[in-house]
C-alpha cells in the first residue's frame, strides 16, 4: 500500500486513510464536485461509516458560499445530489484532521505543501491525477470556471472515474486492516 500509516488503537498501524480532503482554489467547482461524487460513491458502496470526505479551497474567495451554479447543474445532470456544501479555506489544522489531502491541480498542491511543517504532513498530500485513467492525457483537473457547460461536464466525468479509482484503492486497503 502506497499510503503512509497512522496509529490506530493500541498503537497498531492502520494502512489506509479514512478521512479524505479534496482541495481546489476557491472551493466552488472542482473540490466540492469531487466531495459530492465521492460521497455518492461511498453511499453506493456502503462505506459511509468507514471513509469520510470533505473539501476546501486554498483561497478565501468563497468562504460560506454554495458551489458554482454551473457545477451544481453539471452534477445534477450526472445524478449527483447537492449535499449542502459551503465553501471553506484550507487550514494547517487540516493536516491533523485528514489522512489524505487531494489537491486538484499542481498550483493547489504547491499551496498546500507550503503549509506542511513535517514530512508526515507533506506525505498526506497526493494529486488527484494519481487516480486518472491513463488514457485521459491530463496532468491535473482542469478548472472549468471560465469555460462553458462542456467544461463542467468534462470535470464531473473525470472526477467520477478518478473518485471511483480512489475508492477502490481505499476500500481495498480498508479490507486489509
Image (cartoon, rainbow, N blue to C red):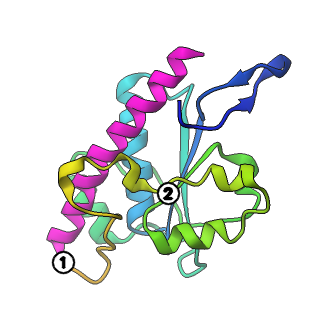
The earlier-in-sequence mark between 1 and 2 is 2
Quadrant of the image occupied by residue 52: top right
Find residue 143 and report its horizontal and vertical position in percent: 33, 73
Rendered position, 12 above or below 109: above
Q: Residue at x 20, y 70 (%)?
A: 151
Q: Is residue 165 left or right of residue 158?
A: right
Quadrant placement of the C terminus:
top right
| Depth check, front residue: 138 or 49 | 138
Give SS at disc 1.
loop
In this figure, which residue is indicated by the disc labeled 1?
A: 148
Q: Is residue 61 left or right of residue 156?
A: right
| C-alpha separation, residue under disc 1 versus residue under disc 2 | 22 Å
Please check the rendered image and state whether residue 150 is part of the magenta-colored stretch, yes or no.
yes
Q: Select label 1 or label 2 by which is in front.
A: 1
Q: Is residue 89 visible?
A: no
| Depth check, front residue: 119 or 38 | 119
Find residue 91 and report its horizontal and vertical position in percent: 71, 65
Q: How many marks?
A: 2
Find residue 156 and report its horizontal and vertical position in percent: 26, 56
Q: Residue at x 30, y 65 (%)?
A: 71
Rendered position, 102 above or below 9: below
Q: Is residue 91 visible?
A: yes
Secondary structure character of the magenta stretch overall:
helix
In this figure, which residue is indicated by the disc labeled 2?
A: 85
Give SS at disc 2.
loop
Residue 30 shows which numbered tag? none
Segment colored magenta: 148-177
Amino acid at each position: 500500500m502506497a499510503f503512509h500509516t497512522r496509529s490506530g488503537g493500541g498503537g497498531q498501524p492502520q494502512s489506509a486513510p479514512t478521512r479524505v480532503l479534496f482541495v481546489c482554489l476557491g472551493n466552488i467547482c472542482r473540490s466540492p464536485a469531487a466531495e459530492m461524487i465521492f460521497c455518492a460513491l461511498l453511499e453506493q458502496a456502503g462505506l459511509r461509516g468507514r471513509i469520510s470526505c470533505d473539501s476546501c479551497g486554498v483561497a478565501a474567495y468563497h468562504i460560506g458560499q454554495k458551489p458554482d451554479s454551473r457545477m451544481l447543474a453539471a452534477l445534477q445532470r450526472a445524478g449527483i445530489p447537492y449535499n449542502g456544501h459551503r465553501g471553506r479555506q484550507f487550514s494547517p489544522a487540516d493536516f491533523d484532521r485528514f489522512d489524505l489531502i487531494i489537491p486538484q491541480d499542481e498550483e493547489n498542491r504547491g499551496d498546500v505543501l507550503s503549509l506542511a511543517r513535517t514530512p508526515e504532513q507533506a506525505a498526506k498530500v497526493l494529486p488527484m491525477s494519481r487516480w486518472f485513467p491513463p488514457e485521459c492525457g491530463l496532468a491535473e483537473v482542469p478548472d472549468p470556471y471560465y469555460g462553458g457547460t462542456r467544461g463542467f461536464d468534462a470535470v464531473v466525468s473525470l472526477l467520477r472515474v478518478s473518485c471511483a479509482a480512489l475508492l477502490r484503492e481505499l476500500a481495498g486497503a480498508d479490507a486489509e486492516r
